Structures are given as C-alpha cells and as structure tokens.
Image (spheres, rainbow, N blue to C red):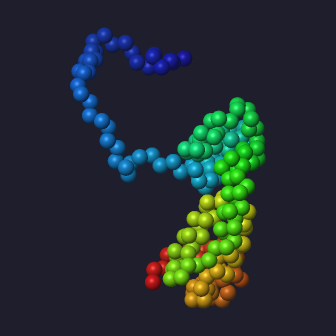
Amino acid sequence: MRTRNSCFLNNSSVTISRRRNKRRTPNVVDPELHTIVEMADNRTMEELLQAPTEGDVSNDVIRLMMFPYSLEENARVWYDKEPPNSILTWDDLVNKFINQLFPPSKTTHLKNEISRFTQRFEETFGEAWERFKDILRACPHHGLTELDQIDTLYNVLNDNDQDSLNAAADGNLLSKTTREALQIIENKSKVRY
C-alpha cells in the first residue's frame, strides 16, 4: 500500500532551495476568470442528478448532499444555522427553505405581481418577455404551469405583439403545444425591430 509520503522517494542528492522572503505581489484575478457558481440555479442540480451513481442512492439523497454548495449569502447563513439532522428529506428542505426566504406575505406579493403583469407602453415584446421571466424567477414556487405562464403573458400583450406571435405560429399561438409555444416566444423575443 502506498501512502502519500511513499510517493516521494527520499533522494538526498536533491536539494530544495529555500525561498527568499521577498515582498509578495498580490494575486490579481481577472474578473472574467473568477469561478462562477451556477448551482444556485436548479438546472445545474438537474444536470448533476443525471450523472450515474453506484449503488442504490436516490436522487433526493444526492440533492440533499449537493444543496449546500448551491447557496450564497443569506441562504448559506440560514442553512449553516440549521441544527444538524433537522432536515432529513428533500421535502423538509424545500419547505424550510421556502418558508425562510419567502415568508407568506412576500409570496403573496410576488404571486400578485405575476398575475397583474402587463406590457408597458412602448415596451418591446422582448423586453416584456424578459421582465416577465424575471418576475417568475423572483418567485420560484409560484405554482404556475408553463401553459399558464404562456397564457398570462399572451393575454397582456398589445395587439401587434399578439398578431406577430400568431403569425409565427401559423395560426393561434395558444393552439400550439407548450414546448412549441415557448420556442416561438423565445425566437420572437430575440428579433430586434
């Protein structure tokens, strides 16, 4: 059996010179090169869950193990303050997390903001779509299906944008499947007039 020290053979003919105590220059990290933590987004968590695992390890166990690495700032402080073994299942974690970071009053406010969403005067379709997605991301537990989201957005758009989406759909956008409708919306949002 090899240990870490046995990997380095003792060679007395090799001398390692000591570093001089020079004034060190600070390490400068280019802002573009810093590590980006994408784990705060559940899409990355879903990608990790696709990785093959050995044995009978459930996805919930993997989620529970990976969850702390996805947290930043206030969420990380909250998680670190939780007593050990107080979170035993993924559902426990989700409930505690949502209740901590989204108290009922905040949840109600965010859900109202989603339901009262309207396209602003002189706002392009692309801008309205991005703003709508931002509102949805602010309340990840909104409970709206993708179809409800499409319906909500479509019904608040001005007539020109509705007509444009319908033309791209070769008919009524709302008669398309959810996936097709989302693809049309994404494609139309990238068009700049």
Residue positioned most to the front:
105
Residue 70, how many percent across, how many down?
58, 45
For the C terminus, the image quarter is: bottom left
Residue 89 picture quarter? top right
Residue 139 picture quarter? bottom right
Q: Closest to the observer: 76 or 165?
A: 76
Residue positioned most to the top:
12
Residue 183, how many percent across, how many down?
60, 74
Q: Is residue 13 above or below residue 140?
A: above
The residue depicted at 33 percent of the width and 13 percent of the height is 11
Examine the rendering and report whether any part of residue 104 can be seen.
Answer: yes
**Image label count:** 0
Residue 153, how many percent across, how many down?
64, 76
Residue 58, how many percent across, how many down?
74, 43
Q: Is residue 40 above or below residue 186?
A: above
Q: Closest to the observer: 59 or 132?
A: 132
Examine the rendering and report whether any part of residue 141 can be seen.
Answer: no
The residue depicted at 69 percent of the width and 71 percent of the height is 115
For the N terminus, the image quarter is: top right
The residue depicted at 45 percent of the width and 80 percent of the height is 192
- Left or right? Give the position of 84 relative to 126: right
Q: Closest to the observer: 52 or 171?
A: 171
- Left or right? Give the position of 38 relative to 95: left
Q: Closest to the observer: 183 or 119?
A: 119
The residue depicted at 52 percent of the width and 74 percent of the height is 127
